[in-house]
Image: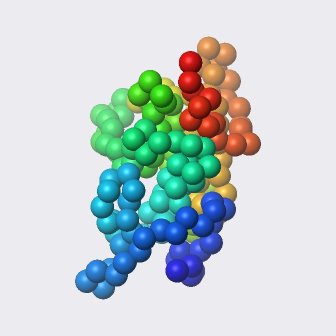
Amino acid sequence: MENEQFPKLIFPDCGLKVRLLNGKLQVFDVVRKKFVRLLPEEWVRQHLVHFLQIQTKWPLTHIAVELGLKLPTGLQKRCDVLLHGPNGQPVVLAECKAPNIALTQQAVNQVAQYNLHFKLPYLVVTNGLAILIYHINFETKQIESQAALPNFDSFLA
């Protein structure tokens, strides 16, 4: 399936279910439990979701995708991936970009702006070719770059 539009990503191959329907590619979204239009950003999102489920042991029941939110400015937006901890509280917000979109400060600012709504300790931005992970300490007002995503179990109290 890999090609210029859907390249090999940094995430392990996860055997996405892809089909062609009415001339359009679709991919099965394991969170929404339905086929959705396969676009480059969706290619990245689905690989990230599978990575989260398999590598960081995040249960699908604790992953939300394409969740609507209202920013403090009143704008309606959608966050790509929201991870809930064992107690059901959101803890990680992830923004997915198409592989041809560079991970610029603008992309980081976008997820940070979305986080004004949630105030979560972890932010992720990925285009599937690279990943940026940040931990936010709201007490010290420090933001630290992280080498890896936290495992689901790390949020068990």
Point 62% across, 29% down: residue:
154
| Residue 35, position as x, y percentages in the image | 32, 66
Give the colour scheme of this rendering. Answer: rainbow
18 over 56 or under it: above or below: below
| Residue 67, position as x, y percentages in the image | 34, 44
| Residue 153, position as x, y percentages in the image | 59, 32
Given residues 92 and 102, the one toward you in this image is 92
| Residue 139, position as x, y percentages in the image | 62, 14
Query: Left or right: where does residue 121 sit relative to residue 147?
Result: left
Work out whether residue 92 can be spotted: yes
Give the image quarter of residue 134.
top right
Point 41% across, 74% down: residue:
18
Give the image quarter of residue 117.
top left
Given residues 29 and 124, the one toward you in this image is 29
Image quadrant for the C terminus?
top right
Point 56% across, 43% down: residue:
57
Query: Left or right: where does residue 97 sit relative to residue 66?
Result: right
Tell which residue pokes out farthest to the top in this image: 139
Tell which residue pokes out farthest to the right in this image: 147
155 over 31 or under it: above or below: above
Point 39% across, 56% down: residue:
30
Tell which residue pokes out farthest to the bottom in this image: 23
Number of numbered discs visible in the structure rendering: 0
Work out whether residue 113 can be spotted: no
